[in-house]
């Protein structure tokens, strides 16, 4: 039952994270980098404060590390990056589209891992889809329709769905959820940093102007919420099959 509770908690933090990110007007790449970098700092401090987690991080084999890095690319770089872009165009409505990621995860889990959906997972899957449909109907008049926002929202769902599938492989390598989150956020921070550098170099865009940091406190709070979100999702996956 504890794993289901962790799954519910991840949804609560995900909703709060979405709302806070929608309040900012910072450049999307900068926002994604700061968001994931502060999340990385939080988990890094947590690992340093607990020698057991530090030992577990050091004990990860190369194969396990590669799996988590690939999952990080889909989940954080593709998923989170697209999510922030979707929020930019359609606001909190992005959460409705991104909520389709369990569907993507189930489809690719059956294709790639040949896994069957358990009865509990089937019920949860149906609740997720029905909830998304009900939310769309109730908020129909308030939903912002934008082709770019919809595209990025669906891309986000794809990224997160693929991450769930690949993370299952990492969990089979007996990698602790904290170590997975650490590698995920570190990989994401590096990728977004490179994107920012290339963007500044090729477009000569002054993205680092001081006004971009007016929402730094909100981004840090959002990073903490995302940290909780990822941790609880991973904890839930530790005890549940797709």
Image (tube, rainbow, N blue to C red):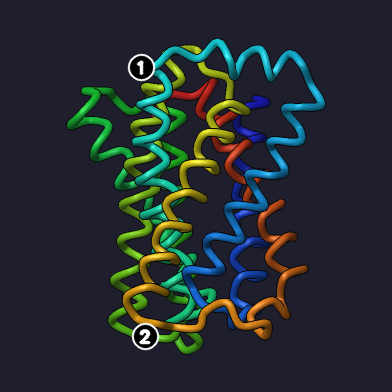
Residue located 36% across and 22% down the image: 169
| Mark in front: 1 vs 2 | 1
Looking at the image, residue 178 sits to the left or right of residue 125; the answer is: right
Residue located 60% across and 50% down the image: 11
Which mark is first along the chain, 2 or 1? 1
Looking at the image, residue 103 sits to the left or right of residue 227; the answer is: left
The residue that label 2 is drawn on is 145
- Residue 61, position as x, y percentages in the image: 44, 12
Determine the residue located farthest toward the right in the rendered image.
Answer: 49
Are there few (<14), some (14-19), or many (20+) residues within 10 Å of tag 2? few
Q: Is residue 130 visible?
A: no
Of 123 and 241, nearer the camera is 241
Q: Is residue 157 visible?
A: yes
Looking at the image, residue 100 sits to the left or right of residue 6; the answer is: left
Determine the residue located farthest toward the left in the rendered image.
Answer: 111
- Residue 155, position as x, y percentages in the image: 31, 60
Residue 26 figure quarter: bottom right
Cβ atoms at labels 1 and 2 below 8 Å apart: no
- Residue 207, position as x, y percentages in the image: 52, 79
Mark number displayed over residue 63? 1
Residue located 34% across and 68% down the image: 152
> Element type at marker 2?
loop
Of 45 and 20, nearer the camera is 45
- Residue 204, position as x, y percentages in the image: 40, 82
Q: Is residue 100 above or below residue 50?
A: below
Mark number displayed over residue 107? none
Residue 220 figure quarter: bottom right
> Element type at marker 1?
helix
Q: In which quadrant of the rendered image does the N terminus lie?
A: top right
């Amino acid at each position: 039952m504890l794993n289901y509770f962790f799954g519910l908690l991840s949804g609560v933090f995900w909703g709060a994270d979405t709302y806070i990110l929608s309040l900012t007007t910072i450049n999307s790449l900068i926002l994604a980098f700061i968001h994931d970098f502060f999340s990385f700092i939080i988990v890094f401090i947590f690992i340093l404060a607990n020698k057991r987690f530090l030992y577990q991080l050091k004990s990860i084999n190369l194969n396990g590390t590669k799996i988590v890095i690939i999952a990080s690319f889909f989940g954080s770089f593709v998923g989170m990056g697209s999510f922030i872009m979707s929020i930019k165009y359609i606001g909190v409505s992005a959460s409705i589209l991104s909520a389709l990621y369990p569907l993507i995860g189930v489809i690719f889990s059956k294709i790639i891992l040949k896994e069957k959906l358990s009865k509990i997972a089937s019920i949860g899957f149906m609740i997720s889809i029905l909830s998304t449909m009900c939310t769309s109907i109730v908020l129909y008049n308030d939903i912002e329709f934008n082709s770019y926002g919809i595209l990025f929202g669906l891309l986000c769902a794809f990224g997160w769905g693929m991450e769930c599938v690949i993370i299952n492989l990492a969990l089979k390598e007996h990698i602790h959820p904290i170590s997975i989150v650490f590698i995920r956020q570190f990989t994401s921070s590096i990728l977004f940093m490179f994107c920012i550098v290339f963007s500044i170099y090729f477009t000569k865009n002054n993205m680092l102007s001081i006004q971009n940091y007016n929402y730094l406190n909100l981004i840090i709070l959002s990073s903490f919420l995302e940290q909780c979100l990822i941790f609880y999702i991973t904890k839930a996956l530790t005890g549940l099959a797709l």
